[in-house]
Image: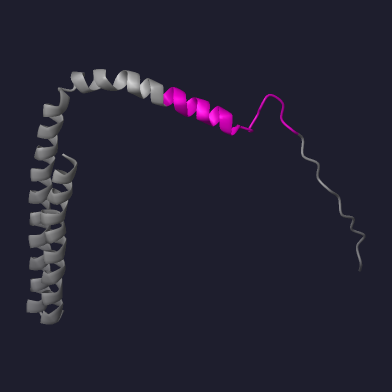
Amino acid sequence: MNRNTQLATMKLVPLRGYSYRISMRQIATHMRQTMALGIAIGPELAFAGGGLDSATQGATTFKIWLYSFLGVVAACVLMWKGAECWADRAHWSEFVTMCGKVAAVGSVVGVLAPYLWNMFS
């Protein structure tokens, strides 16, 4: 019941016309070209978008939207956990822990983020 088996090696055929070897010099050249194009186009795009005043106003609008969204989400999370505790599906200690977590996240968003924003502006 022994079968005669022979091991054969498979030879790979190289594809012609395809070169997958990219040198570091080519990568550096493409990066330099991309950076030069970005620097050349950048000021025009900033002026077309309204300049720095428009960007500052957009960032302020986003900040107000983010704070209101996070406030609504925090209130919903606390109401959900409070309803679970009221229905005896969770302990009140979990509610207190959740209040601490919401306060910690709120302090990061309310204190640390504006501090970092003012540091870079």
Q: Residue at x 12, y 33 (%)?
A: 56
Quarter of the C terminus within the rendering: top left
Is residue 88 something one can see in this rendering? no
Name the residue at 15% across, 65% down: 104
Q: Is residue 24 magenta?
A: yes
Boundaries of the magenta span: 14-34
- Judge whether 35 appears above or below 76 on screen: above
Give coordinates of residue 10: x percent, y percent.
81, 45
Res 11 → quadrant: top right
Q: Quick one: 102 or 35, which is closer to the camera?
A: 35
Residue at figure coordinates x 92%, y 67% from the top left: 2
Residue situated furthest front in the rendering: 119
**Looking at the rendering, which quadrant does residue 63 occupy?**
top left
Residue drawn at 13 percent across, 81 percent down = 93
Question: Where residue 118 sits: x, y (%)?
Answer: 13, 44
Q: In which quadrant will I find the N terminus?
A: bottom right
